[in-house]
């Protein structure tokens, strides 16, 4: 499981011939560029030909608007999301709109008081139901796996991930596998489903700031907890939609069966008494 998961951000499964960077700011004593994302213009992706219909979602701003402004300069309608910053909701500039909420596995207000919605809820709120998201940028501090779990594993909400053409992820793994096995099992199922949906990894790099490397069971090399990757939907869609929510339904059915067995045992005991 760990080898498969850590191969995902390090072993490309396809390629992009027309790739370039959007955004990025140099900062810190080493003047490292951060906030940039790789973007692919190959067919069958339609970003290069989208023109006025181009739609980009950008999750995680942290006051760095370089990607969003570059995407707007490319001609796209940009929606920027970050519940953690003190910035007014609404239009930032022509073509860029800021929303003071984040993305996650279910609708809720988290412990920091931030409003969180699922991807399908956000598309519905913004009136984008049925539209193509040409690029989904996520620097959401782990929200990427919550989004994948809600879209690919859970039975709740509407499935909309097939409306996304490419994803620029900052991937966040967790440090202690012994304490985080539930996370890693869920992440493993999510990545398998994402690949079956047709998303291929075409570019990767380590996070520029975090230099530490770690060893995980079954992985023969030291690996990072943070990666920058580009996924494009250029493969065949073989994902079984009926699998969405299947495990959760199985758990509910098993609990219901156990409760029924217990009830029957209690009733039988009363009758014998």
Image (cartoon, grey):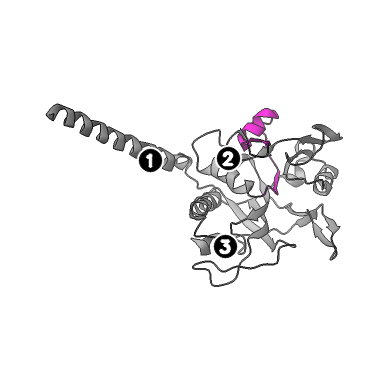
Segment tinted magenta in the rendering: 113-141
Query: Residue 272, image x and y in percent?
Result: 12, 30
Q: Which residue is mark 2?
A: 105
Q: Secondary structure at mark 3?
A: helix
In magenta stretch: residue 140: yes
- Mark earlier in primary sequence (1, 2): 2
Query: Residue 179, image x and y in percent?
Result: 51, 56
In the image, which is nearer the foreground, mark 2 or mark 3?
2
Q: Nearer the viewer, residue 8 or 82?
A: 82
Query: Residue 199, image x and y in percent?
Result: 60, 51
In magenta stretch: residue 208: no
**In this rendering, does residue 15 appear at all?**
no
Q: Which residue is mark 1?
A: 250
Quarter of the image for residue 263 reads top left
Q: Residue at x 55, y 49 (%)?
A: 194
Tell me the number on the disc at residue 6. 3
Q: How far, Cα to Cα, is label 1 from label 2?
A: 20 Å
Q: Residue at x 50, y 40 (%)?
A: 154
């Amino acid at each position: 499981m760990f080898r498969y998961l850590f191969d995902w951000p390090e072993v490309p499964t396809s390629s992009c011939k027309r790739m370039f960077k959007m955004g990025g700011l140099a900062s810190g004593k080493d003047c490292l560029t951060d906030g940039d994302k790789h973007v692919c213009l190959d067919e069958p992706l339609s970003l290069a030909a989208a023109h006025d219909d181009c739609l980009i979602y950008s999750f995680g701003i942290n006051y760095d608007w370089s990607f969003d402004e570059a995407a707007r300069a490319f001609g796209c309608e940009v929606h920027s999301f970050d519940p953690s910053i003190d910035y007014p909701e609404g239009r930032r500039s022509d073509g860029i709109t800021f929303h003071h909420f984040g993305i996650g596995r279910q609708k809720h207000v988290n412990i920091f008081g931030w409003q969180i919605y699922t991807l399908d809820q956000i598309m519905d709120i913004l009136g984008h139901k049925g539209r193509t998201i040409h690029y989904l940028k996520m620097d959401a501090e782990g929200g990427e796996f919550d989004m994948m779990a809600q879209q690919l594993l859970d039975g709740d909400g509407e499935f909309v991930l097939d409306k996304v053409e490419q994803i620029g992820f900052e991937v966040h793994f967790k440090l202690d596998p012994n304490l985080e096995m539930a996370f890693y099992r869920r992440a493993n199922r999510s990545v398998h489903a994402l690949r079956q949906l047709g998303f291929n990894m075409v570019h990767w790099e380590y996070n520029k700031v975090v230099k530490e490397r770690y060893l995980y069971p079954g992985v023969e090399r030291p690996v990072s907890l943070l990666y920058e990757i580009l996924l494009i939907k250029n493969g065949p869609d073989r994902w079984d939609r009926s699998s969405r929510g299947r495990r959760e339904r199985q758990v509910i059915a098993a609990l219901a069966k156990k409760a029924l067995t217990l009830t029957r045992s209690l009733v039988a005991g009363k009758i014998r008494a």
